[in-house]
Image: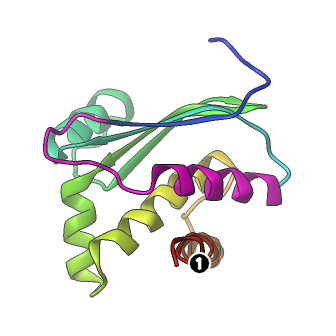
Amino acid sequence: MTTSNKSSVQFHSQLDDFKLKNKTLIKKTLLELSQKEDARVGTINYIFCSDEYVLELNKTYLDHDYYTDILSFPMNAEPLEGDIFISVERVKENAATFNTDFTTELYRVIAHGLLHFLGYDDHSDENIRMMREKENEFILALKEKLI
């Protein structure tokens, strides 16, 4: 693992038909979120994948046999470094389930991954509420930049 003084948020896709829009603004907003939390970012990779790819990671590394929208694999706490795998199919399903648009749900899940690296978890109602507040702040900040 190499660390650098330079922050790097990178986006990759395992899917031929998925292209993330507004990468520069998303990166900027993620870095702002980490600064608000007094954290420094090294290299964070977001990898957009299929349900099956994330399921295999979940089985292999976490011994969980179920679909999930996101898996976060932190590699370093200072600076923040790691890989975040996002199932685009799960995000689409979540958007329909929660009656929101795909882009908003995608932004929520992107923020969710960084929040895990920042030490937030979603194992209790109170922690879930705190994460939702932070996700909503991220979404609002990002959408304001897009106007």
In this rendered view, identify the residue nearer to me: 12 or 108: 12
Circle 1: element type:
helix
Write down the quadrant of residue 129 in the picture.
bottom right
Query: As drawn, which residue projects farthest toward the top?
Result: 1
Mark 1 = which residue?
144
Residue 31 in percent (x, y) is at 69, 50
In this rendered view, identify the residue nearer to me: 17 or 60: 17
Query: As drawn, which residue projects farthest toward the right?
Result: 38
Query: As drawn, which residue projects farthest toward the front?
Result: 147
The amino acid at mark 1 is Glu
- Magenta stretch holds residue 31: yes
Callout 1: 10 Å neighbours few (<14), some, many (20+)? few
Residue 40 in percent (x, y) is at 79, 40
Write the start and end of the magenta stretch as one range.
13-36
Q: Residue at x 27, y 87 (%)?
A: 99
In this rendered view, identify the residue nearer to me: 1 or 145: 145
- Magenta stretch holds residue 34: yes
Write down the quadrant of residue 46 in the picture.
top left
Q: Residue at x 20, y 80 (%)?
A: 96
* 30 with respect to 65 (left or right): right
Establish if 76 lies above or below 29. Answer: above
The scheme the figure's colours follow is rainbow
